[in-house]
């Protein structure tokens, strides 16, 4: 087991939990404030790269935690788009 993979996997896992908290906050608020969906989309794309990169380099723990990050980011992007459009329709 590679200790750097375990450490990176822990950081990735914590990142996934942090994004999940952002999803929960967005769900509770039902609106988007202070976050650009394009920024979250960029980090989601980076997460997809990591899902490819980690297994190629034998980083099992990072890969598993990276799946959490990508899943949470995809959820958040979807929520940001949904609530932004919903608010525009209400204001429209």
Image: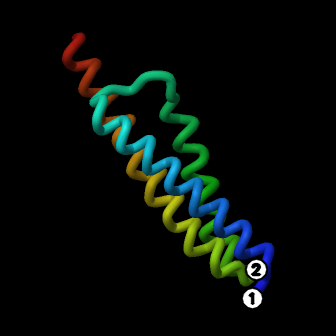
Q: Badge 2: how crowded within 10 Å, few (<14), some, or many (20+)?
A: few
**Vertical placement of 53 versus 56: above or below?**
above
Tell me if I can see residue 18 in this picture: yes
Which quadrant, please, contains the N terminus?
A: bottom right
14 lies above or below 33: below
Q: CA distance from mark 2 to mark 1?
A: 13 Å
Count how many numbered circles sit on residues in the image.
Answer: 2
Question: Tag 1's secondary structure?
Answer: loop
- Snapshot quadrant of residue 84: top left
- Residue at 53% in and 43% down: 41
State the residue position of label 2.
57
Give the foreground label among 2 and 1: 1
Name the side, left or right, on which 17 lies relative to 24: right
Q: Residue furthest top?
A: 92
Look at the image and tell me whether residue 77 can be seen: no
The reply to whether dot 2 and dot 1 touch (C-beta < 8 Å) is: no
Return the x and y of residue 20 as percentages of the image width and height.
44, 50
Q: Which residue is mark 1?
A: 1
Residue drawn 52% across and 56% down? 16
The residue under the point 44% across, 46% down is: 21
| 24 and 78: which is toward the camera | 24
Asked if 58 appears above or below 87 in the picture, the reply is below
Residue 50, position as x, y percentages in the image: 65, 65
At 28% across and 35% down in the image, what residue appears? 28
Q: Quadrant of residue 6?
A: bottom right
Residue at the outermost left position = 90
Secondary element at image label 2: loop
**Of callouts 2 and 1, which one flags the residue occurring earlier in the amino acid sequence?**
1
Q: Residues within 10 Å of mark 1 (few under 14, many from 20)?
A: few
Q: Position of residue 88 (x, y in %)?
A: 28, 18
């Amino acid at each position: 087991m590679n200790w750097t993979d375990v450490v990176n996997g822990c950081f990735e896992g914590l990142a996934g939990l942090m994004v999940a908290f952002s999803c929960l906050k967005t769900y509770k608020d039902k609106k988007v404030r202070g976050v650009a969906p394009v920024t979250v989309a960029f980090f989601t794309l980076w997460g997809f790269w990591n899902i490819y990169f980690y297994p190629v380099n034998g980083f099992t723990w990072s890969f598993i935690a990276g799946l959490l990050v990508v899943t949470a980011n995809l959820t958040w992007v979807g929520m940001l788009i949904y609530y932004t459009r919903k608010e525009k329709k209400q204001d429209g």
